[in-house]
Image (spheres, rainbow, N blue to C red):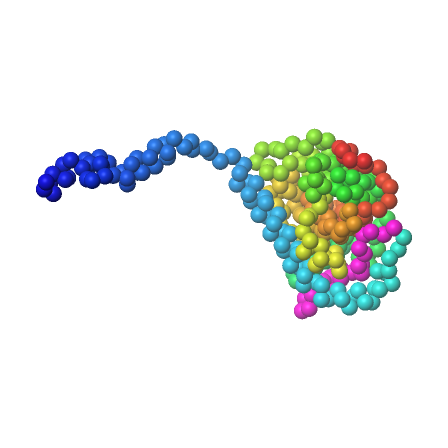
Amino acid sequence: MTGSDTGRYGDAYGQGHDEPVDTEVERELRVLLQRAAPDLPAPDDRMDRVRERVARTLRRRRTAALAAGLTTGLVAAALAAAPALAPGPSATVLRPATTAPPLPGAPAAPAPTLATDAPGPVAGTVPTSVPGAATSESPAPEVSARPLRFPDLGGVTVDLPAGWSSTAVPAAEPRASTGYVASEPLDPKPSCGPQQSSCGPVGRLAGGGALVTITLVGDQDMAEKLSGGRAVVETDVDKSCGLRGGTRQVVGHRIVDVANAAAVVELTACLNRPSGQTVQQVQHILDSVRTTGDAPTAPGSTRG
């Protein structure tokens, strides 16, 4: 038998040379699988949600970085304020010194006033109060408020200014729940408007209005960095706040005790051309965060 006879009748293993080889079979199978797989389109708001998560992550990292730089300067202030840090009756909020020195090399910031749309903080400083709120040079007017508790947020309690509204959007886990307080009426059933990637109980803020969103941040590193101080940062207005008509956005963090562990409460204030009184009320809410004492529960709460 010659070599040509072997090619005609097949090899010793029974496969003829006229049959398709393995590479051709694999190629045809790959084409069939590609044709059979459906081409599922991405959700319309997928990119909006991705951008919202990225913006939130960057904002938290920026706040954590500023707080880390503040730690060194707070050591001297903490020693000077030792009596103020002494434990008091039923106090679970970690209270540092009420003011924080600017970072080394930062220019001195002028005393802010209660003017509408007061300027933001001087670059390089980490304020502990909302820019535009009253200072020691301009005494704060007394804010009429009542305590309000969010049991779905680990029992976080704030002082709600008179005339303000509140609601809670509970979830299975406290860190997935959200609390809202606003200077205008809130819808108890939050809904997303067109092009909005995050829902809220208010549509467009009226002039001079404010909406404060309260959440628990599960970031132990941030809790450790902020344990010696409280940071308030004026950030760029994100898409969600902008769609509500916001012209300013302030993010503040407070350390509280939730289930015998330190937790970070994040408060994000969206403001639309706020008056001095509105800024002062937002500052009062930030300063009142705690987990102690009895208080009425926020509307929409599911836990007692």
Is residue 95 found inside the magenta-colored segment of the image?
A: yes
| Residue 128 image offset from top left, x and y in percent | 75, 56
In the image, residue 227 above or below residue 107: above
Q: Which residue appears at 63% of the width and 55% of the height?
A: 62
Residue numbers of the magenta segment: 90-111
Q: Which residue appears at 81% of the width and 40% of the height?
A: 149
Is residue 281 found inside the magenta-colored segment of the image?
A: no
Position of the N terminus, as image quadrant, is: top left
Q: How many marks?
A: 0
Which is more toward the observer, 71 or 279? 71
In the visual, does 165 lie left or right of 244? Answer: right
| Residue 43 image offset from top left, x and y in percent | 51, 34
Position of the C terminus, as image quadrant, is: top right
Q: Which residue appears at 78% of the width and 39% of the height?
A: 151
| Residue 198 image offset from top left, x and y in percent | 62, 38
Q: Which residue appears at 42% of the width and 31% of the height?
A: 38
- When asked about the image quadrant of residue 98, the answer is bottom right
Regarding residue 228, the answer to whether it shows in the image is: yes
Regarding residue 107, the answer to whether it shows in the image is: no
